[in-house]
Amino acid sequence: MVQVRKHHSVDGDGTLDLESWLRHMQRLAQLDGGTLVTLRRAAEVSAEAEKRAIAAENIWAEGASSFATGLEMAEILADLQIDGEALCAAILYRAVREKRLPLKKVEESFGQTVAKLISGVLKMAAIRSRSAETGSESRGGAVEEHSENIRRMLVALVDDVRVALIKLAERTCAIRAAKNSEPDKRRRIAREVADVYAPLAHRLGIGHIKWELEDLSFRYLEPDDYMQIARLLDEKRLARQNYIDEVLKLLRGQLKHADIDGEVYGRAKHIYSIWRKMRRKNIGFSQVYDIRAVRILVPTVRDCYAVLGIVHNLWRNIPNEFDDYIASPKENGYRSLHTAVIGPDQKVLEVQIRTYAMNEEAEYGVCAHWRYKGTDKSQSQAEGRDGYEQKISWLRQVLDWHEEVGGNPLQDDLQTSDVDTRIYVFTPDGHVMDLPRGATPLDFAYRIHTEIGHCCRGAKVDGRIVPLNHALQTANQVEILTGKRESPSRDWLSAGMGYITTSRARAKVIHWFKQQARDQNIADGRTILDGEFKQLALTNFDFEQLATKLNMHSLDDLYAAVGAGDIGVGQVLNRAQRMINVDHVEPAPSLTAPVARGEGKADVYIDGVGNLMTHIARCCNPVPGDDIMGYITLGRGVSIHRKDCANMLRMQSEERERVLQVEWSEKPSQLYAVEIIIEAYDRHGLLRDITAMLDSQRINVTAMQTRSNRNKHTVEIVLTAEIRNFEELSRVLHRINRLPNVMSAKRRILH
């Protein structure tokens, strides 16, 4: 049933009695004195911001109060036993949202955490605003897909469980206040709540908020059906209550006789769930089993099954109407026993049986962690923080909706729906598309339509022109610029240039090139390979032999395969690498050395010690995964210690010059010293950008020289880098060539 909205304590003149409200909050959430002082200050700041806005005629919505809404949100969250920072953020959120209070001032007055929580909720509001128009106009299956993607996008933005809870409280206030809104606005709010926030409350397992959101949104979306069911429930309410009272009396007697200390009470049935069951099973109101329902709470799981036996001994159970969610919990963690029986007077009765802890989890979901664990004063601060991080991790798993509406046939490449591996972006008209993390505008274009991808000539992200290999982020709005005479570029297939990351887009581009003339593919393939080999300084290479090694009948076949995209440049370079006599390339001294363990057995490697001998220090005996440091001994190479080892801490203070930064490493591959020559127009920060890019690719630089030409404003940079193979070298050269002001980057060989 719909929850009646609570009224705040007011004085005789109609103003809020803040002290009375704070006492109510203290009883509700068991707040300490310091938290109450902060909440009072937040309420005063919000009230003052509203007074200033009214005086300046800054009215957000007629009849709405950011101050009152903030207090109502805090009440909802206090019932969930959430912490003081989140309560403070809830009180201030609407004032910030309505631009009555700067977020910077919140940070200065209440701290970074409160400001960050409000900022997170504002992001969720921005997503809602951007998608609202499209969501209201979609029909049929498009509604399901759009709503699902909006939920996923919101989840991708949430990195703190409290942000989601504050947003749920805000939308609960919005749907409660919708009764005073215009019909169109009321339906828009109800649609959003039904599609996004009621499912969110369900996935978090917060039952009492979920039921209220479902009933209120149903009331505004389907008013006739809502009133019909409400009327049917009301007609037989007295008779149904008398019936339940008799059942409760009988069950309490049975529990007492069995010496089970439990609670038994009638359970209100929610109008939306009745309507949904009637539609799903295509049955009438009289056939809904759980209109008459009771719930039994007991201390232990063993008691649950004992009570189930009592119920089935009292009344005959209905076949196929028993569910054991204790043995097999629902995906949101819900646990309970459900059974339907033929009760007294041959009337159907539903019985739910669960422990007190299960009931807390069913009512408060993720927040039950606070209600049980948050009050354990014996926990250390570190343990408390670890527990909080576990809650955040758990939220990310709970919020994975991938089985909520079944598989998504439009999903591409990755079958997982993990929010950490997907991004969610907007089309220009507000639809949401999901892509793998790292996807580019070209991946997006081919996801929309093959022809849009083929004709792509540029892209805008959030109204700004970006390169086609720009990595998209969740909540970006992407617009593809097309031209009638545009066509795919061979560069798009180069892995090193990063234009395409999804197999779907790559397959579309390859298919397009296959449809082009063979002669054109041969010419394009020759141009691609000549450019690559020239950049790598591989002159006088035997391409005929290379074609044979790649199982091609002729060199033209190799060029055609490269031109059509059937074989990647990386594959060609890997084969060329194996053909070259490695004696002609000078190996670089490895940065990775084996560690002696036991009888000189080297199965662990340390990065950062060159070719020095290493051994594990016996004082702390570090193992792979520990944070470590090295110490240069006299005659025994480098000893490897844990960072927190007492000996290492002493050596850091007394002999710092002999301490090395090291880390665990995999068994090293062969590294080769390669000289790279870069020509560029000189600019501030050029060297920094080059070294930052090399560092991001984990490329070690052993030497570097620069020479400037002040007349031409150019610079020549020669660096020596340690490279594993030609494919890695090609990727590095492509990335350097993409940096601003760089004219060319290629390998240099001294003859």
Image: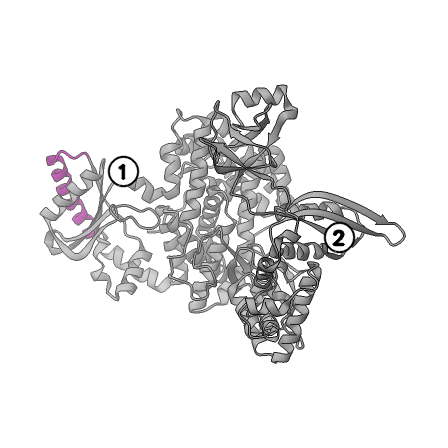
Where 509 falls versus 735 (above or below)?
below
According to the image, what is the colour scheme of the structure?
one colour
Q: Is residue 65 visible?
A: no
Q: Is residue 206 visible?
A: yes
Could you say whether the residue bearing mark 1 is in a helix, strand or loop? helix
Give the quadrant of residue 653.
Answer: top right
Indicate yes or no whether the magenta region holds residue 431.
no
Where 295 falls versus 468 (above or below)?
above
Mark linked to residue 750: 2
Mark linked to residue 356: 1
- Which of the two marks, 1 or 2, is nearer to us in this view? 2
Give the quadrant of residue 576.
Answer: bottom right
Left or right: 87 as drawn, with respect to 293: right
Q: Quadrant of the C terminus?
A: bottom right
Residue located 55% across and 75% down the image? 553
Amino acid type, callout 2: Leu
Could you say whether the residue bearing mark 2 is in a helix, strand or loop? loop
Left or right: 285 as drawn, with respect to 318: right
Residue closest to the eye, 607 or 26: 607
Residue closest to the eye, 138 or 93: 138
The residue stretch that appears in magenta: 238-261
Residue closest to the eye, 605 or 588: 588
Residue closest to the eye, 256 or 494: 494
Which sits earlier in the primary sequence, circle 1 or circle 2? 1
Mark linked to residue 214: none
